[in-house]
Image: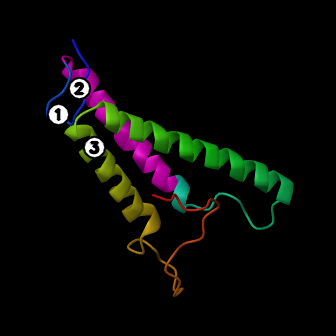
Amino acid sequence: MGMHTTFFFGGTGNSILYLLDLVIVFMMSLIVECLSHTRFISSESNNWIAGVIQVGLYGIRISLAYLVMLAVMMSGVATFVVAVVGYTLGFLIFGSRVFDKSDTESYQKPSDLPPLNC
């Protein structure tokens, strides 16, 4: 059995494992967006401790983003669609103003981490 070199439609032989893979990719992309748009460190925190937490969160976020990218590259169209839906839903929940209850005029919620650049 060879490896696909292009996008393909369809799953692998075991549909339960394929569905589990799709759920995992979806959850990883959702977590990446959560980490990108959520504030975990309070402003009163010690700078050194806050910096260590920030570096750790950044490492987790980048690792998950690369794992999602690798999953999409190694899998088919369904994995790509699930990743895009996960990122989009994550942005809707954590990054957009749809669920923002504050009265501020700012477009973007503060985050502890710099934005992911494409």
Magenta-drawn stretch contains 17: yes
Amino acid, disc 3: Phe
In the rendering, at what x and y percent does residue 90 appear?
40, 56
Q: Residue furthest top?
A: 1
Q: In the image, what residue occupies the spot 47% across and 77% down?
A: 101
Q: Which residues lie in the magenta part?
A: 13-34
Q: Nearer the viewer, residue 47 or 40?
A: 47
How much space separates mark 2 and mark 1, taking CA atoms? 7 Å
12 relative position to 71: left or right: left
In the rendering, at what x and y percent does residue 3 appear?
26, 21
Q: Residue furthest front?
A: 5
Which residue is under mark 3? 80
Question: CB of mark 2 within 8 Å of CB of mark 1?
Answer: yes
41 relative position to 5: left or right: right
Which residue is under mark 1? 8
Which residue is under mark 2? 4
Magenta-drawn stretch contains 31: yes
In the rendering, at what x and y percent does residue 55 appear?
70, 49
Point out the frontmost of discs 2 and 3: 2
| Residue 28 lies in quadrant | top left
Magenta region's main secondary structure?
Answer: helix
Q: Is residue 113 visible?
A: yes
Question: CB of mark 2 within 8 Å of CB of mark 3?
Answer: no
Point out the frontmost of discs 3 and 1: 1
Q: Is residue 46 visible?
A: no
Badge 3: few (under 14), some or many (20 or more) residues near its Cα, within 10 Å? many
8 relative position to 37: left or right: left
Could you tell me how many numbered marks the image carries?
3
| Residue 91 lies in quadrant | bottom left
Assign a secondary structure to mark 1: loop
Query: Which quarter of the image is occupied by the C terminus?
Result: bottom left
